Image: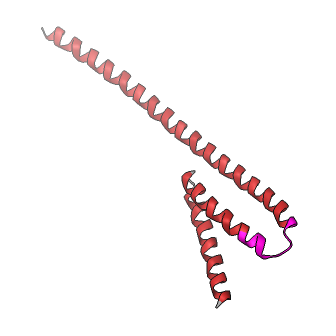
């Protein structure tokens, strides 16, 4: 009977080892997938920012006054901040938010 009791234990240990290998592979693949998703989100955001900058060059050259580009820049920041948060770029969202607050502070100081 002692031989019979050792046999299931060794079988159980093989199953648990195999499961742990699979679990490690699953965890590794999940982390790789999360990294790829994050990298794609960052690439998309950079692409959107580049497109916005190219459109800014066009619009800024067409607008005759200084107020138009400034208003456009504020509107762009209002769109880019939530977009950066949604795409997982918290640092960029914080920087853009600070820029927007500074611009708002300067315009409120200038109107007094």
Query: Observer-nearest residue: 39 or 112?
Result: 112
The part of the chain drawn in magenta is: 61-71
**Residue 112 image point, x, y percent:** 64, 91
For the N terminus, give its image quadrant.
Answer: top left
63 in the magenta segment: yes
**Residue 20 image point, x, y percent:** 37, 28
Query: Observer-nearest residue: 11 or 29?
Result: 29
Residue pushed farthest bottom?
112
Is the image coloured rainbow, by chain, by secondary structure, or in one colour?
secondary structure
Which corner quadrant of the image does residue 32 belong to?
A: top right
Q: Where 36 sits versus 24, above or below?
A: below
Q: Where 66 sits versus 83, above or below?
A: below
Tell me: 14 left or right of 85.
Answer: left
Tell me: 43 left or right of 2.
Answer: right
Q: How many marks?
A: 0
Magenta stretch: helix, strand or loop mostly: helix
| Residue at point 57%, 58% (across, down) | 82
**Residue 79 image point, x, y percent:** 63, 60
Which corner quadrant of the image does residue 80 belong to?
A: bottom right
| Residue at point 67%, 65% (across, down) | 75
Tell me: 108 left or right of 59.
Answer: left
| Residue at point 65%, 65% (across, down) | 77
**Residue 58 image point, x, y percent:** 84, 60
């Amino acid at each position: 009977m002692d031989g019979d009791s050792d046999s299931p234990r060794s079988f159980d240990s093989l199953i648990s080892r195999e499961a742990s290998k699979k679990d490690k592979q699953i965890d590794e693949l999940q982390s790789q997938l999360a990294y790829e998703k994050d990298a794609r989100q960052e690439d998309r955001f950079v692409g959107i920012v580049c497109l916005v900058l190219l459109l800014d060059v066009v619009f800024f050259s067409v607008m005759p006054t200084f107020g138009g580009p400034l208003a456009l820049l504020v509107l762009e920041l209002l769109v880019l901040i939530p977009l950066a948060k949604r795409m997982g770029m918290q640092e960029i969202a914080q920087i853009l938010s600070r820029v927007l607050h500074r611009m708002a502070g300067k315009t409120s100081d200038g109107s007094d």
